[in-house]
Image (tube, rainbow, N blue to C red):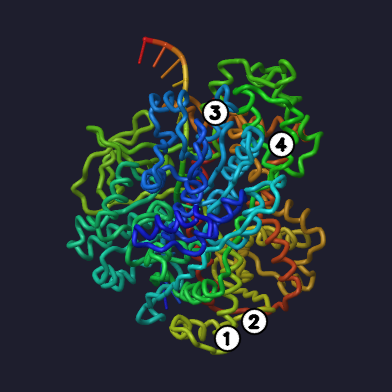
Amino acid sequence: MDDRIKAGINWFEKKDWRPFPFQIETWENFLAGHSGLLNAPTGSGKTYALWIAYLISKINKRPEKGLKFLWVLPLRALSKDIQSAMEEATIDFGFDWEIEIRTGDTSTKDRQRQKKTPPDCLITTPESLHLLLSQKKADQYFKNLEAIVVDEWHELLGSKRGIQVELAISSFKEISKQKLKIWGISATIGNLAEAQRVLLGSNEKEGKFIRAQLDKEIKIESILPDEVEKYPWAGHLGIKLIDKVLPIIKANNTTLVFTNTRSQTEIWYQQLLNKDPDLAGAIAMHHGSLNNQIRTWVEEALHSGQIKVVVCTSSLDLGVDFRPVDTIIQVGGPKGVARFAQRAGRSGHRPGQTSKIYFLPTHSLELIEGAALRTAIKEKDFEARIPIQMALDVLLQFIVTLAVGDGFEPDQLYQQIKNTHCYHKITKKEWTWLLTFLKTGGESLSAYDEYHKTITEDNKIKVINKRIAMRHRLSIGTIVGDQVLNVKYVKGGHLGTIEEYFISKLKPGDTFWFSGKALDYVRLKDMTVQVKRSKKKTGQIPQWMGGRMPLSSQLSFHIRKKLEKLRTKELDEIELTKIQPLIDRQMQLSTVPKTDELLIESTISKEGFHIFIFPFEGRFIHEVLAGLIAYRISVSQPITFSIAMNDYGFELLTDEVFDLEEMLSFDLFSLNNVKEDILLGINETEMAKRKFRDIASISGLIFRGFPGKNIKERHIQASSSILFDVFSEYEPENLLLKQAHREVIQQQLEEERLYKSLKKISSQKIIYNKTNKFSPFAFPIMVDRLREKFSTESIEERVAKMQLQLENI
DNA sequence: GACCTGCTGCGGTATG
């Protein structure tokens, strides 16, 4: 055995810890000069696997000066843990290297020092990495780079942040004198092989794939209502089962309660405390709109055992990496298998231990999801993270990043990005368009100086204008946030952020609950909501207009399978036995479709004629299908519909009854002309406009303002909207405009999945039932529509806002 | 009769 491997093993054994086989495998491959991907769960010592690989490769070699090793993370909060783990091993191996962190939190002083004398190893984020690339002499800085590790690669892959990593790596390959070792660390996802290819790029010969065979058992237990007949058919809070949650909390030292939304977190926190006042001081909450200091405090208090329970959203999905907990409770359907498994993995954190997760259904039908999750996890049916292709906004940003540094040679850079996964299909024509766009602003914007960004000097493309360079550095990154309002006490003290939409519903003196406290709304001043502690016991809970997650296709597949079992009374799981009375009612009123059947129900009520269609494909797909079917019906009959949907199906409601059977004979689900019909059936332009707002920001068409002095959201929306209209009218070939439309088709309409679903549906046998009452499947969709009705006010508000925008232009 | 939601992530100047 190689002495260096022995040294690694010795190190572990001194810690009374044997290395796992995957770690030794990693060392062997690293020493042999390979790149690759490591598939390992948290808590398996994955950091040590790769860092020690590097350390032992340096035994008896005098390391060169300068930056040699990069560790890239998606979350800056994790950097300190990684740093201390690395430092521990470094000292033990007798190296006196500096391991430093470079993120937005790094002080100006430290930055300058790091710039002058780079550390041996740098822990950083994709954004900070690009900031470093935008410095003068960046190639000097990175020229001795030997290895780069991208941690939590599954979190970055599939997002524009992932593309930033791809692009940075493509540069490092060019800059570094020696062959660069590139390693990714990823949790289990459905497309690990692809994840590896994307990370390494196409000019890397085949990488090594290492899987930590540390399969841990995940035990899933559903929290069951006593009588399913009395449990709501629809809903999302799950508070009715709170009495069953308290004993679980009591029986464990530490519990994480995951909810799907921020307001749900606030509600559950408050309700748990109400039910059991003894929890005071032992319970906390954690979500993305809370003040960062509070969140950090919660993470540390959880770590030290100071608190027992944290109610949270996915903001805690990553952050508790090094902080073991006993038990997890998931409130409401997690919508995806991978997400559920990851949350479960937060408990029984050590290899070999069993993870325990409780699933709390928030309405009766969700019981089926509990059973479906169990099977999906057993069969390792995890979702894939689809890498984004040809995101030209990110590429434009990257080109300018290099141009504000030392500049670049266009032909060389073209070859370089051709080797990335994201841009391997880019054509010379598109490349030339991008360069021209940066030089002249393109056809539409050539009259404006601020869009003349680059010049050519000594065969290199550069940005020499200081103002453009500064503004660019301020705008690096791909996360485009929404405008939020700060919540502060009148006397100072920051609590977190809420949205204007919520506060516009309140008047001064009103009470709302936020961050677990009752607050009186005092006034709105300079984008800050000023509040005072309230003595009132009740108040509204804020809502945030966050993203909506559709049911993944993996999970819908397994739900259909469970429905099949319910239909045939093969009740081998407790969830299925429990839900049976409701299924009986569904069967009695209508039916439960077989997997090769499409169920359609119609009901006449005083509201009108309701058509319910149940493809079980997730709400995004249903939204598009609803638009498509409504359009196709309206072609032959002048009918308008109101549309509602959930993850199981959708509803078309109209005020006049018509012969649906006849309509169905026209093959409403046909694949012929489907693309055209979809575009006619939905408001694609509006969707593209919304996508374009982010694209305009990322590509640098719109400046989002100086730190602390953000340009008003309205202004950004208005300017991106103007640009969108101008391009649409005068420059339809604009590649950014085209990208906006492409993003709608691929991401919003989930193109690939949509065609698969349509194909499936068009081969399914239609079962059409007229019901005199709403079936258990149909009812929850109705509820969704009722809720939409309440939001008509906000539509008026939106119209008013749009008018305001026009006046401001 | 049943309900009343919608995740996460990062980054930063010049001037007074």
Q: Amino acid at mark 2?
A: Lys
Between marks 1 and 2, how big is the CA–CA gap?
8 Å
Marks 4 and 2, the one that precedes in the sequence = 4
Q: For numbered disc 3, what is the local secondary structure?
A: helix
**Mark in the foreground, 3 or 1:** 3
Between marks 1 and 4, how big is the CA–CA gap?
56 Å
Looking at the image, residue A232 sits to the left or right of residue A657; the answer is left
Q: Which residue is mark 1?
A: A567
Q: Which residue is mark 3?
A: A141
The answer to which quarter of the image holds residue A277 is bottom left
Marks 4 and 3, the one that precedes in the sequence = 3
The answer to which quarter of the image holds residue A177 is top right
Give me the residue at 67% from left, 41% from top.
A391
Please say if A414 is above or below A276. Answer: above
Disc 1 and disc 2 in contact, CB within 8 angstroms: yes
Viewer-closest of A34 and A444: A34
Q: Which residue is mark 2?
A: A594
